[in-house]
Amino acid sequence: MEKKHHVVVVGGGFGGLACVRALKQERVEITLVDQRNHHLFQPLLYQVATSILPTSEIAWPIRHLLKDRPEVRTLLAEVEGVDPEARELRFTDGGRLHYDTLVLATGARHSYFGNDSWESSAPGLKTLEDATAIRRRMLSAFEAAERSSDPEERRALLTFAVVGAGPTGVELVGIIAELAQRVLPSEFRTIDTREARVLLVEAGPRVLPAFPDGLSDYATQALAELGVEVRTGTPVTECDGDGITIGAERIPARTAIWAAGVKASHAAEWLGVAGDRAGRVPVGADLALPGRAEVFVIGDTAAVTNVDGTPVPGVAPAAKQQGEYVAGVIAARVAGRALPGPFRYRHQGSLATIGRRAAVADFGRIKLRGALAWWVWGIAHIYFLIGTRNRVAVVWSWFWSHTTGNNSARLITQGKQGIAVPRAPSVD
């Protein structure tokens, strides 16, 4: 029997899964490798962190998604390196896996701009574990404040700081503010959760810097109406378990969340190539590693330039388009057909929510804001969710949250509280 071409895809995110799904060719067998057993819909991860959605509504077992593809094998493993000469992956447990073609779609991680020690005090938001940890810290802060008899300690516990004013940061502070202002006030007896201080800190001059000025200004105004304190133009210079320092100003804040930057996975190190400033692997117009036509790098792991010379943004639609494009290149090579032209990114618009009743949307000539943009945002996200069950579940959770003012996933789980409980609680 003819030996099939073995394609190994590392990463079950948007790019990797899109590549596997699009690569249907009789002469190919595929192995999908991921260190987690699920595909995650990251655009709604902040809603898990802020207790609107449970984890099961935005994540799906990879094996289940590919159960009807007998030519696809799924491996739960952590990659340690790549041997391009031998065409092998090396795993942390000592195992190896040979490939004929390799697709690296390993995503990005948090970047603290050289201050990695801040991560324990200000976790980022990239995984389900991150989301549940942030939810635990946030909800535990209210619980600890309820017990505290020290006014200064209570103020620090009720201060929530999000660093970075991109879509994730804006979406996080909007929901935290609504949680404090509208959801929790009737449930606590000692504290008034409406006194919570929610800060959004951005080193640049404005929020949502990738959006047009008009939409950025609208977002700033909408956040202010929710009670969010927006601080722009000054970076965070220190961050620890007791608070953050903005420039030279110290702010006691027992809950901090990092949304200020990302850096690529270790793919550049695995391949022995120089990454860009964010650690991304420079690739050619066909998304292959220069000099290694059998190695493709896509998504947040890759530094991709569009045909017009502009950089391709690190967003989910771009990763999906790259995965589908690479699948077409591989299929054409195996079948001996003409190769497709260079990769062309098709921008489908930018969206960001501000709380649960407003949003901004940039579709180039068409720009939306307010409730209409929120409906567009919601429909788009429902459309891209996987499976009817999850679409219905998310719609129901949103409906329940909006009509009752209650969040359905407000549980403190997984271990100890994320913040320290005051030493002298008041139980009078």
Image (spheres, helix red, strand yellow):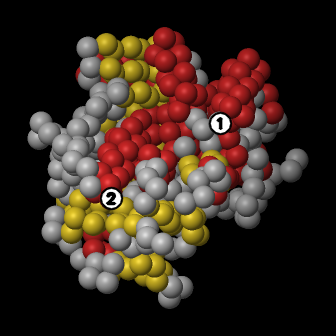
**In the figure, is residue 268 to the left or right of 130?**
left
- Pointer 2: residues within 10 angstroms few (<14), some, or many (20+)? some
The one of 275 and 424 positioned closer to us in this rendering: 275
Q: Residue at x 58, y 69 (%)?
A: 76
Q: Residue at x 12, y 36 (%)?
A: 308
* Tag nearer the camera, 1 or 2: 2
Quadrant of the rendered image containing residue 112: bottom left
**In the figure, is residue 138 to the left or right of 221?**
right
The one of 287 and 21 positioned closer to us in this rendering: 21
| Figure check: 175 above or below 129 | above
- Pointer 1: residues within 10 angstroms few (<14), some, or many (20+)? few
Q: Tell me which label, 1 or 2, sits earlier in the chain.
A: 2
- Residue at the limit of the structure toward the front, as seen here: 1
- Residue at the limit of the structure toward the bottom, as seen here: 94
**In the figure, is residue 82 to the left or right of 272?**
right
Q: Position of residue 207 (x, y in %)?
A: 34, 32
Q: Residue at x 48, y 63 (%)?
A: 29
Amino acid beneath label 2: Val
SS of the residue at dot 2?
A: helix
SS of the residue at dot 1?
A: loop
Q: Position of residue 372 (x, y in %)?
A: 48, 11
Mark 2 = which residue? 334
| Figure check: 176 above or below 29 | above
The one of 289 and 73 positioned closer to us in this rendering: 73
| Figure check: 129 above or below 349 | below
Amino acid beneath label 1: Gly
**In the figure, is residue 342 to the left or right of 132?**
left
| Residue 106 shows in the view | no
- Gap between marks 1 and 2, in whole Å? 31 Å
Mark 1 = which residue? 387
Q: Position of residue 303 (x, y in %)?
A: 23, 54
